[in-house]
Image (tube, grey):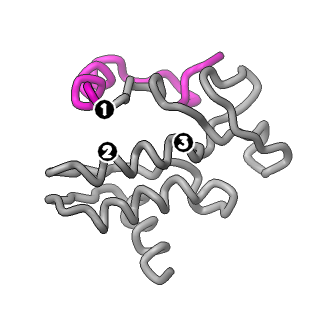
Amino acid sequence: SRDVVAGEPDRGRLDKSVGLGQGHGFGGAGRGVPEWLVDREAVVAECKIVEGAIPDDWMALDIGPKTRAHFAQVIAGAKTIIWNGPMGVFEMAPFAAGTEVVARAVAEAQALSIVGGGDSVAAVEQFRGD
């Protein structure tokens, strides 16, 4: 299996982010995430949900239903939220659910919320009218 991202993550930054999620089931670079929505070619040719390792010839394009529920639960209990980056390829309908769930959870949370990055802001705008 391979890492969640196509390229290699910056290990220094990854180590810091792993520490931020301790105690919440997060494990950095996708470790500890219950499941992924994957596709071979990012064209919805063959889409499936996998738990655990992502097969070498597949790409993680969204988080799966268990992961969505987990993230929403963690966000609901947060006091401060900093969100920078969508959960998947939200511009494509089959891969938008994870980002939409997180966007709605952040909007409903009783927390100080900071949403940064062009893609995250675009996602909030996309789901705002729904």
Helix, strand or loop status at disc 3? helix
116 shown above or below 12:
below
Q: In the image, what residue occupies the spot 14% across and 51% down?
A: 79
**Residue 115, quarter of picture:** bottom left
- What number is the disc on residue 66? 3
Instruction: Tell me, yes or no, whether the two marked residues, 3 and 1, touch with CB atoms within 8 Å.
Output: no
Look at label 1 and name its amino acid. Answer: His
Q: Secondary structure at mark 2?
A: helix
Q: Which mark is residue 24?
A: 1
Q: Which residues are magenta?
A: 1-23
Q: CA distance from mark 3 to mark 1?
A: 14 Å
Q: Quadrant of the N terminus?
A: top right
> As shown in the figure, which amino acid type bears the numbered disc 2?
Val
For residue 24, what is the image quadrant? top left
- Tell me which numbered mark, 3 or 2, is placed earlier along the sequence: 3
Tags 1 and 2 touching, CB below 8 Å:
yes
Residue on which the image places disc 2? 74
Q: Nearer the viewer, residue 119 or 33?
A: 33
User: Which amino acid is tagged 3?
Assistant: Lys
Q: Is residue 3 magenta?
A: yes
Q: Position of residue 108 (x, y in %)?
A: 30, 67
Q: Earlier in the sequence, mark 1 or mark 2?
A: 1
Residue 88, magenta (yes or no): no
Question: Around disc 3, counting alpha carbons within 10 Å, would you say few (fewer than 14), some (14 to 19), or many (20 or more)?
Answer: some
Is residue 94 left or right of 115 when viewed as pictured? right
Residue 44: give x, y in percent of width and height.
Answer: 79, 51
